[in-house]
């Protein structure tokens, strides 16, 4: 995340990252789960179609099978609902595309329909926070289906194939619950502990002139670790949401995880008194197969307070309240996808949906991130077409070889994409090109040329459209978040000033303030990467964050949540909650 160091109020020059956008990161902790899931989901329908000699229908089964890519970070109760929603969303977009394809062959109309679908899919995926791969897979399937030969009479059968494959994908996504039923919430808690440890590890460096006992620097200055602190609070909030989604009646194991997340919160509020190694040791244990580490919670009423208080920290919003801030992104997506498709048609390329999908894949939370994604997309796709040219002779050996190549690239894409989007695109691109050959072999040279041109056209036109559609609401959101932080801090200060304040009141005030600070940092980061808007109140953001975190630290002390002997001793007891 970006630093919140105060800057002059004037506008600064934008530097567009190139090398940084291509830098590789660490792979995801669970990179193998979506990689194996997509193979397990795609293989049975694909191999069955090969046996039946109907590989031309694989486009429709893949629509359902690709749903297995979603919701791997969610607890299984929440995952069941999320996967069902993804399958229904996939079927809805596919139905619109197939009906449109059966009613008209006008390419301009079909591109327009595809652009509108892409905007709707983008808005819904962002609003529901479904997570990777987001709207891109949905848009790829619906856009490709728009240009598949179709009649109205075939639509029900093709939708039935997609629904059957989607049901199988749902089973594949839920299957790990039989082996490790509490795995997702354990991983979320471990991530919160690791993030808190990373922030607490720098407490000694922050305790110096101008710093208080908790390692926070004085007003108007930057502690040099704003990003780590914000990441820690975001991870904690995500852990609470993960735990709450498991149900309203927590088990003993859930309560043990609750107490560990409380320890992460305490470390963030009072980093100088935390033991990073102890936090990391708990995180390592959670990622294993042993029982959940048991820690002491000094509050006797913790189990009754944590769930309801965390729910209050994430207030429910109306549908319009969720969708309204996404309006500029949806407009960018619709305009960019439509213009990219039209430009591809003007160049005489027979598959304009490639340019449309390229544009749809660009749009991120702000223009700076959109530029980075454009660089990653172009580099990954151009490398991918070269890989396809090398593999095409093998895929042309027969239907079985084609399906096996698709499975290999499906696995490779999910295995690599968490390190950097461009690296995953190196495998996604040949996979998309192989899908076009389900109906019959294509000329490799023509496919490579058209895909390369469409990639460049989609990235260029899509980014220009993003520049044209400004997001003035980004600054407004920062202002609203600042107001929310001020109100939450004042409420927490009133609770602290009241010697008779009930524990539940202090708990709710602390969580409300923590959630408001997370929202403020997310809004400031998003707005700082947006162009063509008024200057942001950076200094006010810094002051609000620092005063808010000091209030959080004071609340933690008042609640008696600090360990009696920080940095010493170990907890050897465990609660036997098997993964």
Image: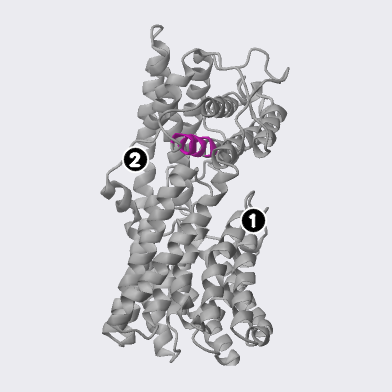
Color theme of the render:
one colour
Q: Main secondary structure of the magenta part?
A: helix
Q: Which of the two residues, 68 or 552, is positioned nearer the viewer here?
A: 68
On the question of residue 144 being in view, the answer is yes
Q: Which labelled disc corresponds to residue 480? A: 2
Q: Position of residue 409 (x, y in %)?
A: 62, 71
Label 1 crowd (10 A; few <14 / some 14-19 / many >=20): some
Q: Which of the two residues, 323 or 392, is positioned nearer the viewer here?
A: 392
Q: Is residue 170 above or below residue 337?
A: above
Label 2 crowd (10 A; few <14 / some 14-19 / many >=20): some
Q: Residue at x 52, y 89 (%)?
A: 440
Q: Residue at x 58, y 86 (%)?
A: 448
Q: Which of the two residues, 265 or 462, is positioned nearer the viewer here?
A: 265
Q: Position of residue 530 (x, y in %)?
A: 44, 56
Q: Which of the two residues, 54 or 517, is positioned nearer the viewer here?
A: 54
In this picture, residue 345 sits left or right of residue 420: left
Secondary structure beneath dot 1 equals helix
For label 1, the residue is 32
Q: Position of residue 220 (x, y in %)?
A: 52, 32
Q: Quadrant of residue 533?
A: bottom left
Q: Position of residue 298 (x, y in %)?
A: 55, 13
Q: Quadrant of residue 517?
A: top left
Q: Quadrant of the C terminus?
A: top right
User: Is 543 covered by the magenta stretch?
Assistant: no
Eye-nearest disc, 1 or 2? 1
The residue stretch that appears in magenta: 235-244
Q: Residue at x 53, y 24 (%)?
A: 252
Q: Residue at x 67, y 82 (%)?
A: 391
Between the residue at mark 1 and the residue at mark 2, the CA separation in whole angstroms equals: 40 Å
Secondary structure beneath dot 2 equals helix
Q: Is residue 75 above or below residue 219?
A: below
């Amino acid at each position: 995340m970006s630093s919140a160091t105060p800057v002059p109020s004037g506008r600064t020059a934008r530097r567009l990252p190139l090398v940084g956008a291509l830098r590789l990161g660490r792979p995801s902790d669970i990179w193998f789960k979506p990689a194996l899931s997509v193979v397990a989901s795609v293989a049975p329908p694909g191999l069955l179609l090969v046996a039946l000699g109907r590989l031309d229908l694989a486009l429709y089964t893949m629509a359902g099978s690709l749903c297995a890519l979603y919701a791997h970070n969610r607890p299984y109760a929440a995952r069941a609902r999320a996967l069902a929603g993804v399958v229904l969303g996939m079927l809805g977009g596919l139905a619109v595309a197939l009906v449109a394809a059966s009613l008209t062959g006008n390419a301009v109309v079909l591109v327009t329909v595809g652009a509108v679908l892409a905007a709707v899919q983008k808005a819904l995926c962002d609003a529901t926070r479904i997570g990777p791969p987001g709207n891109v897979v949905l848009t790829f399937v619906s856009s490709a289906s728009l240009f598949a030969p179709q009649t109205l009479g075939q639509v029900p059968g093709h939708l039935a194939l997609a629904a059957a494959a989607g049901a199988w994908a749902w089973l594949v996504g839920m299957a790990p619950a039989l082996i490790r039923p509490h795995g997702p919430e354990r991983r979320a808690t471990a991530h919160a502990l690791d993030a808190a440890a990373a922030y607490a590890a720098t407490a000694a460096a922050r305790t110096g002139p101008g710093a208080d006992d908790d390692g926070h620097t004085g007003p108007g200055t930057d502690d040099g670790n704003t990003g780590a602190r914000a990441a820690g609070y975001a991870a904690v909030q995500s852990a609470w949401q993960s735990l709450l989604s498991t149900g309203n009646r927590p088990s003993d194991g859930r309560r043990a995880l609750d107490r560990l997340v409380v320890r992460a919160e305490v470390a963030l509020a009072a980093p100088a008194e935390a033991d990073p190694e102890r936090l990391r040791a708990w995180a390592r244990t959670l990622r294993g197969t042993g029982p959940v580490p048991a820690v002491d919670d000094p509050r006797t009423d913790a189990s009754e307070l944590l769930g309801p208080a965390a729910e209050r920290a994430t207030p429910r919003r109306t549908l319009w309240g969720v969708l309204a801030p996404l309006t500029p992104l949806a407009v960018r997506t619709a305009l960019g996808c439509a213009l990219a498709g039209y430009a591809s048609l003007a160049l005489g390329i027979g598959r304009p949906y490639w340019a449309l999908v390229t544009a749809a894949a660009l749009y991120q939370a702000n223009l700076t991130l959109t530029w980075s994604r454009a660089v990653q997309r172009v580099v990954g796709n151009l490398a991918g077409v070269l890989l396809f040219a090398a593999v095409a002779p093998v895929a042309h050996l027969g239907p079985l070889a084609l399906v096996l190549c698709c499975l290999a690239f499906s696995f490779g894409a999910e295995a690599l994409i968490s390190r950097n989007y461009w690296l995953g695109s190196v495998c996604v691109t040949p996979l998309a090109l192989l899908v076009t050959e389900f109906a019959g072999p294509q000329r490799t040279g023509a496919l490579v040329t058209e895909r390369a041109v469409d990639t460049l056209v989609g990235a260029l036109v899509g980014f220009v459209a993003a520049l044209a559609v400004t997001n003035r609401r980004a600054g407004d959101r920062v202002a609203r978040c600042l107001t929310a932080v001020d109100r939450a801090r004042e409420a927490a200060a009133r609770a602290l000033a009241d010697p008779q304040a009930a524990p539940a009141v202090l708990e709710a005030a602390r969580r409300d303030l923590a959630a408001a600070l997370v929202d403020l940092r997310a809004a400031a980061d998003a707005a700082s990467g947006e162009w063509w808007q008024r200057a942001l109140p950076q200094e006010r953001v810094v002051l609000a964050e620092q005063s808010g975190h000091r209030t959080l630290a004071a609340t933690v002390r008042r609640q008696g949540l600090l360990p009696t002997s920080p940095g010493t001793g170990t907890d050897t007891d465990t609660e036997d909650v098997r993964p």
